[in-house]
Amino acid sequence: MLVSLKWLKEYVDIDLDAKTFGDKMTMTGTKTETVEYYGEEISNVVVGKIIKIEKHPDADKLVITKVDVGAEDLVQIVTGAKNIKENDYIPVALDGATLPGGITIKNGKLRGVDSNGMLCSAKELGIDEKYIEEYKKNGIYILDMEDSYEAGKDIKDVLGLNDAVIDFELTSNRPDCKCMLGIAREAAVTLNEKIKYPEISVKEESEKNIDVEVSIESPDLCGGYLARRVTDVVIEKSPYWMQRRLVESGVRPINNIVDITNYVMLETGQPMHAFDMREIGNNKIVVKNANEGDTFVTLDGQERKLDADMLMITNGERYLGVAGVMGGEESEIKDDTTEIMLESALFNPENIRKTSKKLGLRTEASSRFEKPIAQTTAEMALERAAQLIELLGAGKVMKGVIDNRTNEAKKQTITVSPSRINARLGIELSMDEFCDILRKLEFVCDLKSEDELHLEVPSFRLDIEQEADIFEEIARIYGFENLPSVQLQGNTTAGVRTDRQKFLDGVKNAAISCGLYESLTYSFVSPRGLDKIRVPQDSKLRDVVKLLNPLGEDTSIMRSTLIPNMLDVIYTNSSRNIDEVGLFESGHVFTPEEMAGVEETRLCIGMYGKDVDFFTLKGVVEKIFERNGLKGQKYVSESANTTFHPGRCANIVFGDKKIATLGEIHPEVLNNYGINKRVYVAEIDIDTVYSLADNTIVFKPLPKFPAVTRDIALLVKADVEVGDIDEIIMSNGQGLVETCKLFDVYRGEQIGKGYKSIAYSIVYRSLEKTLTDIDVAPVHEKILAELENKLGAKLREQ
């Protein structure tokens, strides 16, 4: 909220500089973001009157002006401006003047002619050109209303550039502060001053009576519609003081009628609208919902598509404006408008917010209507606008007011315990002091008993609902800095990490110890990611949680797998010529269940590089499992997963549960991402791993008896998996097999086509005695027999 300090002083006596005032407001809850001093860099710039203009003798594009700046002699200034004429009042920077941007003006010569100063444009004075008339943009800033100017007067006083504008950051629960009167109320209680509300009275100078008929067909969306009618309207520029206040508040001046409605909105917080009565035509206003699929051209010239949920202002036959958002192009105030109707209405905040979002149109009006507005504010704003129209001679107000309010305003009341509030704040305010603070905030206090205070809430404080709100009001006005500091007492619960969180930390630490870097990506993703990793249409991964109100297509669903995110990060690194990458991400994936999504924790690992292959990734995964208590997992070949390269992918299972998938990414997937390297990815179900992990440490005594080692080389079919061989060896070891280790796999000309040689080292050991060949031989023979029987494995001949 931009607030002109000079304007604010009309409502509250402020005898402080802007910075000090802003700091005090921050301490009472109205945070000051910035303080900007307009005209701070401007000095020795005065009002000048052009007395004479002559051609420059040696330059066709320059003229010599004689300017009255209030001194005994006229000042001669050479300029190339084309928009000036004799008797114009203009800003003149004299010798030694300073301008915004550190510019200093000195006397000099232009093409041999003395030039003792400079005529200034709006831009040179730091005035944003978007707020000024066209004829002032590309030349010297021409001052209007010449009779009110005095040659030689400081330009900052004339143009109101000696002001400070404070930008207040308002919390969402205080929409009443989004206006000058709202800030003035806060300033008054902060500085212990009284607020000076504008004295509003309407003369109703027209002899005619208002004859507009208003009906509300959607009372749930429009709580009231108030209107006044003005005749004998004269459309012209609004006075400079009003234009300046609008500009400092970030609103572009247009004409006197529109400027008055905007001025009242900034002053009271109630958005208003003025309709050209010629466009209403039948003197009827009907507030109703739009028809589905209709279109409407708004004031900005854009055609908007409407739906049945949008509230419209109509004359019963055609649309005049989008309620609470923007008026229509046809019903706007025009240069030849002679009769208008002023609207001040109460709309449903939620409906205005939805309409504004659907139309992609957020205005000063809609931003205020998105929060509740008090009925009394709507009434005051209408009268204030009518008063200003009369004061500026912009028209004559007809007799009578249309007041079609569907609900009567109810006074909000609340009962509080001052002693309880005192105790919680650690202070001892007397009842008089307690009530004094609340009365300054415009509460009506009624003491029912020694500790029961009945409060009538001001109509504009729609955020006050319970005692906790009064607690806050007392604390901020009494002063947070005045509250005593008290050491916390009582029993507290130490903040500790849960077992699941500790487990996840262990997983991350294990990944980092393997040389991986952690990445972090968004949970909101694009559905195109599932297409890029070739997820089948009937896959459960496509059963996603969709966002009802996404920022865009790229963030429209909650991710069901981490792999697209990981490949995005890998692409980023690859495209920047990073030769080797090892990454992991621990995050949530989401699956829909009734009205909410179920979160599941996943760990995704992504790798590529010169020395990286499937077994590198497998080693990292095994190390993570080993470090975090998971033992006994098995690797099962996976060929149906379309994201991975067929024959280079495996599922990791534990019992009947799949806990992970790892492998080399399919070339087509890599092509979809523009990656030209082999990439290896694993995705682990951390929730399941956590439920299966056992970190119990079991100590075993060192073996007392020596081991017996037997090496075997088996000839098996190429499709036999070593996991099956491991299982047969261990299950038939009769308690004597301590370990079996694969140490060689060979394929070549010496082996028949479709076969491979698998070499194992089997270690036998007994905890009870030293084994002999007689002990080991039957067990070893049994293992070989089972391998041949189940897998067709035969000992390879040397």
Image: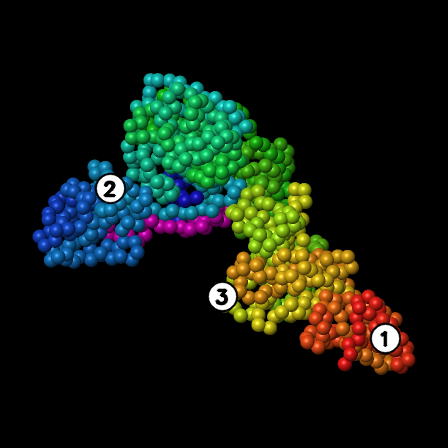
Cα–Cα span, label 3 and label 2: 52 Å
Residue at position x 86%, y 74% in the image? 781
Which of 86 and 95 lies nearest the eye of the viewer? 86
Residue range (magenta): 19-46
Residue drawn at x 20%, y 55% as measured from the top left: 95
At 39% from the left and 37% from the top, the residue drawn is: 302
Disc marking residue 135: 2
Q: Nearer the viewer, mark 1 or mark 3?
A: 1
Q: Is residue 21 magenta?
A: yes
Query: Real-space Cα distance between discs 2 and 1?
Result: 104 Å
Q: Residue at x 40, y 33 (%)?
A: 297
Of labels 1 and 3, earlier in sequence is 3
Question: What is the three-letter code of the residue carrying label 1?
Answer: His
Residue count near mark 2 (Cα–Cα under 10 Å), binned few <14, some 14–19, many ≥20: few
All told, the count of numbered labels is 3
Where does residue 476 sit, x and y in percent of width and height? 53, 46
- Closest to the camera, between mark 2 and mark 1, is 1
Q: In which quadrant of the rendered view does residue 498 lie? A: bottom right
* SS label for mark 1: helix
Classify 10 Å Cα crowding around label 3: few (below 14), some (14-19), many (20 and above).
few
Which residue is outermost to the left?
57
Q: Which residue is mark 3?
A: 576
Q: Amino acid at mark 2?
A: Tyr
Q: Tell me: 783 left or right of 449.
A: right
- CA–CA distance in space, label 1 to label 3: 55 Å
Q: Give the residue number, with chain letter if any, for mark 1.
A: 780
Tell me where residue 699 appears, x and y as whole percent: 82, 72
Q: Kindly state the secondary structure of the residue where label 2 is placed.
A: helix
What crowding class fits label 1: few (fewer than 14 Cα within 10 Å), some (14-19), or many (20 or more)? many
* Magenta-span inclusion, residue 370: no
Screen quadrant of the C terminus:
bottom right
